[in-house]
Image (spheres, rainbow, N blue to C red):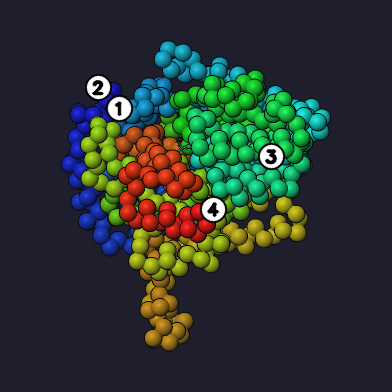
Amino acid sequence: MNAFEAGGEGRARLTQTAEWQALAKHREQLDGVQLRELFAADPARGSRLVVEVGDLHLDYSKHLVTEETLRLLRELAAATDVFGLRDAMFRGEKINTTEDRAVLHTALRAPRDAVIEVDGENVVPGVHAVLDKMAAFADKVRSGEWTGHTGKRIKNIVNIGIGGSDLGPAMAYEVLRSFTDRDLTVRFVSNVDGADLHEAVRDLDAAETLFIVASKTFTTIETITNATSARNWLLTELRAGQDAVAKHFVALSTNTGKVSDFGIDTANMFEFWDWVGGRYSYDSAIGLSLMIAIGPAAFREMLDGFHLVDEHFRTAPAELNVPLLMGLLGIWYGNFHDAQSHAVLPYSHYLSKFTAYLQQLDMESNGKSVQRNGEEVDWQTGPVVWGTPGTNGQHAYYQLIHQGTKLIPADFIGFAEPVADLLPGLVAQHDLLMANFFAQTQALAFGKTTDEVRAEGVPEELVPHKTFKGNHPTTTILAKSLTPSVLGQLVALYEHKVFVQGAVWNIDSFDQWGVELGKVLAKRVEPALTEGADVPGLDESTRALVGKYRELRGR
Ligand code: F6P
């Protein structure tokens, strides 16, 4: 029996395994344990409970765990054969069973000489052929050799895509802004609300604008609608015919037929494959807008960063395996402490879209309630992932993390150095930013006792209000600087963390059937809005709302 067949009939019910039961018992024994106590009992804890991978230094000492907790969690991972499923993924086996697909985003960043087979075919040469084609195109745009229909140089790039065809490149463009060609304007359109495209193009010269239509399936209604509107806008602005499209539209897709139906020359299509999930795809052709912005060399550095963590995940022993550790810590809180959410709080303005990106990665992957064998789970699966850059959060929702009633484990991500091209006058602000970074994890872990508050002379009636119980678990991820490689390392870390959790929970982290129903219903409802058509199966509440909408629109 191989690892993913073990997800079928042969696998014991998770909550009934001896390993799960042992953790539940251990949790009871640890009830009420305080981080203050754990640190007092082990003064070296802060320097001992750290791991390194690539450029990332990860401190997990401020977690409600002992050596015993970590050992029991690793035993759960062994019992659920996390590494077996991992090896099957890296081998190109079809571990996405509900879609009968391999899961090989790791092949997208493999070196040129690697051999990774799907159905007996080595996919690595194809990956590098597309990367080379992307690099040649990116260089042409960046150098001005690629011109628009009227001969003008391309100065604006507009990526049209949604979900995994938007969040990844949009996030990474933001993260790596200081590595981008600042003469290029790069925008991302995803929302089918016409306002998104309107705001993206209203001040652009169509003759200088390149649209990148990013869609794995090339059937996603939001993307195709926006791409069609963008084409109309372009042709109207240029007063040109269909032949102008070739110089202003390229496609990123797995679907050659649909790309060609749309009118895009398939010579200007950059392909990827069905073994790349949408939310795992920005290091594929979906990253073309990013590659144009940062250049092929920086893009390769980013891929190498991903690969470094892939290799770590594939080969590091369980005790040192960082994605395994992160995944298991999440399981500890989600399954044994009833934590419902997980905050990711970057202390870098450039990571402002990072958590939004992780929301799709994590919640579309592990937001499941049916096991790989089709049976319902009776344990919690993926958490609600949320967060924004830390200092802004401090003045908004940190109050609830510090003194609310919910347990919210959080990842703090920060950098020793500001980005290289920061205006010299702003460099000094970095220490203040990072002082907040360190202060917050300290405050969350250790709080402020009633005695400490009293000792400050606080009036007795305010003492309970000013007391911080602490004991809020955090992971600190620190790196020297935010480079393309470090971004790749960070994303791969979270990808594999999500993998680990899905493997333990016995769910298919690589399908997304939960998004289908809404799509089907939207198609059905649209004629009710536009034509007042009587839509069968519309419930009473929705029917009344549609009526109100039509009334408000004067229809
Ligand atoms: O609806 C969800 C989804 O399928 C995501 O998984 C995907 O990233 C997104 O839609 C966009 O899909 P496509 O790239 O095929 O347009």
Q: Secondary structure at mark 2?
A: loop
| Residue at which label 1 appears | 4
Marks 4/1: CA–CA distance: 35 Å
| Residue at which label 2 appears | 1
| Residue at which label 4 appears | 346
| Residue at which label 3 appears | 233
Which amino acid is tagged 4? Answer: Pro
Which amino acid is tagged 3? Answer: Trp
Quick check: can you spot residue 488? no
Marks 2/4: CA–CA distance: 42 Å
Quick check: can you spot residue 254? yes
Q: Secondary structure at mark 4?
A: strand
Return the disc, 4 or 1, that comes first in the chain's sequence.
1
Marks 1/2: CA–CA distance: 8 Å
Which amino acid is tagged 1? Answer: Phe
Return the disc, 1 or 3, that comes first in the chain's sequence.
1
Residue at 67% over, 61% down: 429
Q: Within 10 angstroms of label 1, few (less than 14), some, or many (20 or more) residues?
A: many
- Number of the front mark, 2 or 3: 3
Marks 1/3: CA–CA distance: 49 Å
